[in-house]
Image: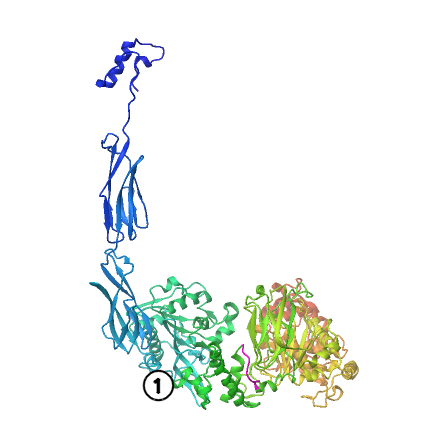
């Protein structure tokens, strides 16, 4: 602002001076007289915008053109520096920068506008891609003869962008090898190579096509190239340790692509050791043991010529659909060393965390052609659930897989933490799975056999058609029954089952007989499915339902809330009987609400009898496996057991709530529940037709018995009450937390698999004839005999009990029940775990003696009334002085504890047992295990028994002896020692 005098406060200039001042400011524009109004000054404004060039044409996406804009005012004068804003009518066709740079984005025409103030101008941008090249993908393709695969082609503009709606002409350099249609679908004609080309005008591109053999014989030849007929001769399963059950066998089912590679074949058996198949577009090779890919020296076939050659061949075959050089990602450095030695140049060891779990993520598998996967070694999992999906995607997209697993080890040590064998999940749908078995030698395994002869589909067709098969082919049949069911081949399946039933040998039978093995394994694995005929072994055990037994539908409410159990009770997985029986081979349906159909619950059919292995049991007197279990993963779950059995809901320890369960198609089962049922109703239910019945006390013992024997008793409640008292005396001696938090199941077996009887959670498996002894309290005669026992004392028993059994004449084997029940109270301090070899089968009989003495025969605190043999029921210290722990047998070791009972009483022994759970006897002072027993005994009886234990040569540590001596008690030895 120019400050003139007229603008100075308080100064007033004459008019003349003011007018002259204004004229001077505006120059020669003109003047007006004093007192006249001046005309307004009009500033320039943007009136017109011109954009150049007016049109822009693009033949490739990403191409650019620079536009410029000129702005004019109302007088037509250029307004230099006037601001301009650029915009596009469609950014999907063309974009424009703030400086006017236009970039082609998509085919079409749009307007580019430049705006300045209220004025604007525009140019037209036209994008029309022009083909300047062709790309065919993939650039290398492998397809099997007779199979098809599709090539893709794209027209490209000058900047490499795909041009839409481009037509191509496809051609093959050798149509006798590979033919191609107008859409790029390539069909393999014969083994060889050809070039397939896609052309658009003058532009073209090609893919190299390799046509591979589809004949399993050719696949087999590649994988076994340069291997001897017996590649593992003089090699040992389990490596340096001999047979450690690291290697098992593979199962093949009805996948058209699966084929055997190496087979251990005999007159009556065949075991598949190596197999190949496909997964989507990819190829897979499976090895049935960690030895094939092991990272260490403990058990490995790597470093042996045949093992190394087999691995290299497997990788080459699995990677045949990828272009060389193959890029390999492998489990461990030993594998990498072998493959690099075989000429593979791009080998990398997969990453792993501190837990040894390998990183088979999608990122890790990017740009990989073949993955070599070790599922587990010993008790360590390398392949876990989260890696399965990316590996399957990798293979389905054409990647190769070489996979090894030790299924039996996984079952022993890993399944409880990581679920089912991940290798089986990985190869689901390939027709290959791992058997939970082991083989003692692999030296006889051979590559020399008729591959087509052992293709599963061929074996199945022969069996269904009635062809008589050798034992080697029969051994391949069991998984094919389930394979037929999975494929919906129910007509063929029924024909096969009818033949199986007709040819199943009568029991007892040789477990080596091929027909027996087929009947057993199919009965264990098939289903859920309704068999067309009843398996003949069901009639032997557990028995067939009565003729005309009605299959019903019913709903029961299962209480999983732990109501009625001690708050601090030990909680275990529960097997809750539903009160129904599945008929042999029948399809029964279980329904639960959707909130319970999560897979956490399971349904079992049949009892957990011992598994009869062929090696340990050359003769089968019953079916070798009698229990089936099915996960409840849907609202409706089908269940089957070829031999039939009671139905139970298997509930995890931490599961709570009330579960409504609907059972459809089962037979009602007589189930007496102590405190809830009445004998009359139970007896009436025996007529429903199920061959077995149940007597149970919730949280106590459950007896699964034959209906025939059940009919012989008058009061199931007396049976439950008597044995509950028997069990409570075991618990009284043991002390510790309450045990009544899940039922323990007593079952009775025509062929016990391990020993005379055996115990494990949640059942005890007794010999079948013991059922008669268990039911003695259920008759008036039996109860009168039991009441007389304190006066009569122990008597000898007859085993097995005769058909005219009377407890008065033939007795009961009380030690059988006391011993096996004693196992339930064993802890790591007292006979389980690492202490089992020392006292596992010794300590349980302390429970036996205590219960028989106190519960049956009315003995006192220092008596051992438990046997008619005076050597058991009395103690002669002098006669025992020669015994030594290291050389004593199990009963002789028991004598040491009998000496202590006679001298210090059962009350002291109970205090010793209870002290393990008493905070006044901390482990830091009183120890655990074998030492802990000696220290705690000393503290409770206030004597120094070190000399006694040293005389026995009991494994007492020096530190434990020092602890005992530090108590300062008087030394004690039995009289006469």
State the SS at label 1: loop
Residue 473 located within the stretch drawn in magenta: no
Q: Is residue 935 above or below residue 613?
A: above
Report if residue 734 is visible in the image: yes
Which residue is pictured at 57% across the width and 65% down the height?
A: 594
The front one of 718 and 69 is: 69
**Residue 204 in which image quadrant:** bottom left
Q: Is residue 949 above or below residue 571?
A: below
Report if residue 909 is visible in the image: no
The front one of 50 and 571 is: 50
Image quadrant containing the N terminus: top left
Image coordinates of residue 498 in percent, x first then y, are 52, 86
**Residue 369 in which image quadrant:** bottom left
Image quadrant containing the C terminus: bottom right
Toward the left, the furthest residue is: 202
Magenta region: 528-535
Image coordinates of residue 909 in percent, x first then y, are 69, 72
The front one of 649 and 491 is: 491
Q: Is residue 501 left or right of residue 560?
A: left
The front one of 800 and 497 is: 497
Image coordinates of residue 816 in percent, x first then y, are 66, 82
Q: Label 1: which residue? A: 229
Classified by dominant secondary structure, the portion drawn in magenta counts as loop
Image coordinates of residue 553 in percent, x first then y, are 63, 74
């Amino acid at each position: 602002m120019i400050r003139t005098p007229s603008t100075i406060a308080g100064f007033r200039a004459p008019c003349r001076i003011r007018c002259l001042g204004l004229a001077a400011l505006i120059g020669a524009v003109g003047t007006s007289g004093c007192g006249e109004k001046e005309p307004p000054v009009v500033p320039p404004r943007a009136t017109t915008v011109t954009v150049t060039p007016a049109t822009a044409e693009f033949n490739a996406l990403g191409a650019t053109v620079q536009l410029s804009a000129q702005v004019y005012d109302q007088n037509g004068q250029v307004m230099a520096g006037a601001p301009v804003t650029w915009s596009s009518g469609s950014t999907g066709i063309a974009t424009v920068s703030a400086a006017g740079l236009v970039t082609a984005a998509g085919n079409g025409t749009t307007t580019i506008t430049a705006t300045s103030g209220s004025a604007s101008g525009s140019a037209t941008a036209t994008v029309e891609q022009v083909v300047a090249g062709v790309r065919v993908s993939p650039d290398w393709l492998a397809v099997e003869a007779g199979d098809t695969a599709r090539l893709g082609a794209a027209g490209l503009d000058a900047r490499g962008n795909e041009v839409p709606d481009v037509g191509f002409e496809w051609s093959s350099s050798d149509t006798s090898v590979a033919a191609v249609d107008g859409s790029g679908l390539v069909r393999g004609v014969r083994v060889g190579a050809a070039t397939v080309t896609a052309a658009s005008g003058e532009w073209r591109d090609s893919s190299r096509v390799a046509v591979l053999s589809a004949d399993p014989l050719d696949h087999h030849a590649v994988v076994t190239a340069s291997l001897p007929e017996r590649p593992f001769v003089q090699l040992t399963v389990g490596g340096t340790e001999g047979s450690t059950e690291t290697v098992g066998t593979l199962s093949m089912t009805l996948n058209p692509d699966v084929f055997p590679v190496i087979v251990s074949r005999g007159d009556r058996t065949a075991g598949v050791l190596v197999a190949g198949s496909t997964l989507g577009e990819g190829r897979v090779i499976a090895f049935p043991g960690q030895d094939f890919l092991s990272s260490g020296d403990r058990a490995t076939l790597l470093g042996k010529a045949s093992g190394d050659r087999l691995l290299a061949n497997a990788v080459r075959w699995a990677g045949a659909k990828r272009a060389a050089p193959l890029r390999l990602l492998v489990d461990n450095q030993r594998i990498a060393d072998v493959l690099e030695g075989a000429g593979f140049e791009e080998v990398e060891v997969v990453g792993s965390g501190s837990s040894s779990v390998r990183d088979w993520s999608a990122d890790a598998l990017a740009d990989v052609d073949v993955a070599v996967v070790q599922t587990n070694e010993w008790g360590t999992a390398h392949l876990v659930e989260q890696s399965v999906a990316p590996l399957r995607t990798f293979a389905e997209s054409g990647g190769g897989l070489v996979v090894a697993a030790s299924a039996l080890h996984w079952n022993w040590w890993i399944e409880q933490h990581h679920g089912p064998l991940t290798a089986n999940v990985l190869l689901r749908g390939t027709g290959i799975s791992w058997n939970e078995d082991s083989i003692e030698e692999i030296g006889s395994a051979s590559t020399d056999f008729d591959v087509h002869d052992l293709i599963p589909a061929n074996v199945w067709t022969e069996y269904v058609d009635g062809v008589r098969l050798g034992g080697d082919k029969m051994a391949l049949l069991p998984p094919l029954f389930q394979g037929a069911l999975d494929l919906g081949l129910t007509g063929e399946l029924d024909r096969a089952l009818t033949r199986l039933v007709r040819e199943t040998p009568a029991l007892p039978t040789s477990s080596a007989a091929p027909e027996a093995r087929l009947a057993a394994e199919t009965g264990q694995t098939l289903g859920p499915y309704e068999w067309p005929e009843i398996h003949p072994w069901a009639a032997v055990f557990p028995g067939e339902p009565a003729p005309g037994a009605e299959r019903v539908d019913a709903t029961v409410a299962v209480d999983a809330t732990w109501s009625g159990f001690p708050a601090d009770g030990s909680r275990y997985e529960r097997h809750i009987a539903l009160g129904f029986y599945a008929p042999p081979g029948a399809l029964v349906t279980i329904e639960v609400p959707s909130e319970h159909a999560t897979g956490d619950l399971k349904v079992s059919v049949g009892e957990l009898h011992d598994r009869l292995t062929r090696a340990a049991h050359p003769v089968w007197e019953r079916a070798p496996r009698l229990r089936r279990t099915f996960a409840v993963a849907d609202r409706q779950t089908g269940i089957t057991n070829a031999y039939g059995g009671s139905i139970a809901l298997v509930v995890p320890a931490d599961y709570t709530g009330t579960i409504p369960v609907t059972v459809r198609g089962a037979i009602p089962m007589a189930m007496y529940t102590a405190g809830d049922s009445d004998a009359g109703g139970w007896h009436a239910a025996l007529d429903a037709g199920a061959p077995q019945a149940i007597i149970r006390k919730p949280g106590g013992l459950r007896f699964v018995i034959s209906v025939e024997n059940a009919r012989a008793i008058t009061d199931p409640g007396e049976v439950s009450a008597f044995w509950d008292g028997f069990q409570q005396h075991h618990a009284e001696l043991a002390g510790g937390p309450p045990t009544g938090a899940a039922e323990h199941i007593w079952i009775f077996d025509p062929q016990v698999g391990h020993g005379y009887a055996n115990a494990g959670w949640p059942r005890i498996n007794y010999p079948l004839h013991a059922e008669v002894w268990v039911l003695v309290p259920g008759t008036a005669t039996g109860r009168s005999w039991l009441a007389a026992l304190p006066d009569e004392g122990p008597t000898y028993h007859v085993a097995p009990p005769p058909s005219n059994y009377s407890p008065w004449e033939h007795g009961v084997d009380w030690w059988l029940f006391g011993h096996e029940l004693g196992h339930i109270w064993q802890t790591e301090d007292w006979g389980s775990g690492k202490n089992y070899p020392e006292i596992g089968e010794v300590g349980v009989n302390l429970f036996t003696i205590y219960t028989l003495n106190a519960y049956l025969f009315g003995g006192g605190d220092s008596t051992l009334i438990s046997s008619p043999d005076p050597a058991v029921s009395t103690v002669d210290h002098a006669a025992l002085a020669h015994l030594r722990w290291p050389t004593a047998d199990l009963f002789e070791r028991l004598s040491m504890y009998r000496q202590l009972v006679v001298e210090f009483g059962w009350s002291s022994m109970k205090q010793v047992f209870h002290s393990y759970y008493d905070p006044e006897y901390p482990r830091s002072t009183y120890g655990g295990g074998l030492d802990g027993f000696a220290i705690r005994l000393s503290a409770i009886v206030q004597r120094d028994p070190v000399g006694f234990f040293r005389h026995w040569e009991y494994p007492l540590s020096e530190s434990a002896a020092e602890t005992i001596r530090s108590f300062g008690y008087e030394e004690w030895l039995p009289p006469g020692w």
